[in-house]
């Protein structure tokens, strides 16, 4: 009994290492925004870190549905759009509505949540808490849309479900550009002047880069807890064998709907963060190509691996938007290279993706997770086996 109650030393040490690394990461992010000088390196690093954190959450939310529940959905861009628009609509300052909704008489929503909280708590506290409240609302609205469309589409399977959810995303994009909803969505015009990352501060300390990491980490932690709960085990059972899962008393429709709604909630949160990152949003940008990009990252990281989705997100964003940019410049280390021209970066990037898919058919992580406790256990076993081998010799 005492042995079962005793904590695993490797687990304890792994948790401590993870906590120290997270603390060090946040210190670095705060220094990056407030202390470190702006140069060509930091000016590229900051947007990659922000977008990588946002895409990590978006990809993990899609992995929950596609990887852990086995539902092939292609509607992620639609939920990102709903989340982004909901966030922007509720965070545009009242005195900016006339400028933003100039073609629709100032718009139908005449208040701003961050502005209202700022009047009561102060500007910085209002922006921080207001952004968090708007992000939660964005997730809830996306979840509500998912619950509505989930009733008919979740009775479909495989390719039919993919086509239905893809159709939903395209319909939502068209509806949000309809001038009939112009007083709310601004029609086909962009939304702007809402609270973005640059407005998030604590006192004089800027949190522009730390904030997306803070929100994404909390959301990913909640998804991990869900995966390791009884509901997560039920999701995996549905993915592995629907007939066997139903025979064990698992309600297929209930658990599919639950996974679909939760995934959409976190996609809506990701859409809100994406709106904050871009500073302006327009429905025309949320095309099906965005869903394919997210699905590609999930596949590269490993379907059924949370850490794989996070690693692949940062690698994808860094390669696509930073590391391979020299291929479009026309030169390499000062030497003129004729075929290094606009668009060549995309060619090389596509070849790299093909190589990864060919040599890592299950993705970078497969269905495994990055665990410091597991690494410590493996190291301990290797050390023990090495010691035994040396003793026998």
Image (cartoon, rainbow, N blue to C red):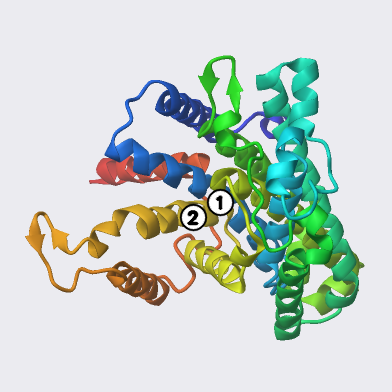
Q: Is 190 left or right of 333, judged from the image as shown?
A: right
Q: Is residue 134 visible?
A: yes
Q: Is residue 142 visible?
A: no
Front residue (pair 69, 391): 69
Q: Secondary structure at mark 2?
A: helix
Closer to the camera in the image, 187 or 357: 187
Q: Nearer the viewer, residue 273 or 250?
A: 273
Could you tell me residue 310's position as x and y percent? 52, 51
Residue 353: quarter of image: bottom left
- The x, y position of residue 25, in whole percent, is 46, 31
Image quadrant where residue 32 sits: top left
Residue, x 43% and y 55% (percent of image)? Answer: 317
Q: Quadrant of the N terminus?
A: top right
* Residue beneath the point at 64% across and 55% down: 190
* Relative side of 151 to 387, left or right: right
Q: Under tag 1, what secondary structure? A: helix
Instruction: Give the class, few, some or many, for how many residues have Cα within 10 Å of label 2's Cα (few <14, many ≥20).
Output: many
Q: What crowding class fits label 1: few (fewer than 14 Cα within 10 Å), some (14-19), or many (20 or more)?
A: many
User: What residue would you read off at disc 2?
Assistant: 313
Instruction: State left or right for residue 246 relative to residue 341.
Output: right
Please say if 55 is above or below 43. below
Residue 113's disc is none
Relative horizontal placement of residue 184, taking residue 214 as reference (left or right): right
Residue carrying label 1: 56
Q: 246 and 94: which one is in front?
A: 94
Residue 339 pos. (x, y %):
18, 74
Residue contact at pointers 2 and 1, CB within 8 angstroms:
yes
- Which residue sits at x=39%, y=77%? 358
Q: Position of residue 75 (x, y in %)?
A: 70, 69
Q: Quadrant of residue 256?
A: bottom right
């Amino acid at each position: 009994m005492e042995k079962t109650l005793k904590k695993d030393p490797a687990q304890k040490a792994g948790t401590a290492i993870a906590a120290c690394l997270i603390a060090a990461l946040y210190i670095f992010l705060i220094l990056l925004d407030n202390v470190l000088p702006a140069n060509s390196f930091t000016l590229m690093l900051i947007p990659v870190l922000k977008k990588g954190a946002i895409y990590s959450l978006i990809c993990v939310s899609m992995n929950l549905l596609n990887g852990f529940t086995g539902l092939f959905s292609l509607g992620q861009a639609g939920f990102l759009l709903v989340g982004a628009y909901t966030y922007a609509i509720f965070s545009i300052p009242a005195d900016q509505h006339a400028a933003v909704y100039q073609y629709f008489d100032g718009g139908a929503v005449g208040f701003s949540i961050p502005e209202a909280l700022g009047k009561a708590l102060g500007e910085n506290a209002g922006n921080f808490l207001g952004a968090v409240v708007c992000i939660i609302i964005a997730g809830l609205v996306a979840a509500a849309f998912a619950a509505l469309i989930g009733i008919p589409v979740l009775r479909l399977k495989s390719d039919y479900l993919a086509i239905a959810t893809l159709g939903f995303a395209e319909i939502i994009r068209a509806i949000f550009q309809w001038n009939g909803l112009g007083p709310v969505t601004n029609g086909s015009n962009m939304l702007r002047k809402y609270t973005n990352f640059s407005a998030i501060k604590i006192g004089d300390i800027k949190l522009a880069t730390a904030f997306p990491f803070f929100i994404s980490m909390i959301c990913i932690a909640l998804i991990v807890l869900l995966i390791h709960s009884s509901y997560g085990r039920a999701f995996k059972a549905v993915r592995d064998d629907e007939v066997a899962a139903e025979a064990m008393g698992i309600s297929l429709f209930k658990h599919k709907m639950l996974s679909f709604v939760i995934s959409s909630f976190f996609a809506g949160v990701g859409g809100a963060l994406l709106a904050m990152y871009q500073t302006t949003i327009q429905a025309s940008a949320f095309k099906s190509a965005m869903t394919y990009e997210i699905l590609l990252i999930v596949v590269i990281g490993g379907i059924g691996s949370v850490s794989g989705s996070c690693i692949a997100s940062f690698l994808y964003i860094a390669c696509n938007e930073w590391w391979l940019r020299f291929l479009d410049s026309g030169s390499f280390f000062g030497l003129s290279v004729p075929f290094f021209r606009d668009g060549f970066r995309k060619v090389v990037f596509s070849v790299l993706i093909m190589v990864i898919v060919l040599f890592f058919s299950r993705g970078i992580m497969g269905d495994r997770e990055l665990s410091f406790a597991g690494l410590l256990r493996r190291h301990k076993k290797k050390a023990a086996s090495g010691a035994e081998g040396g003793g026998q010799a």
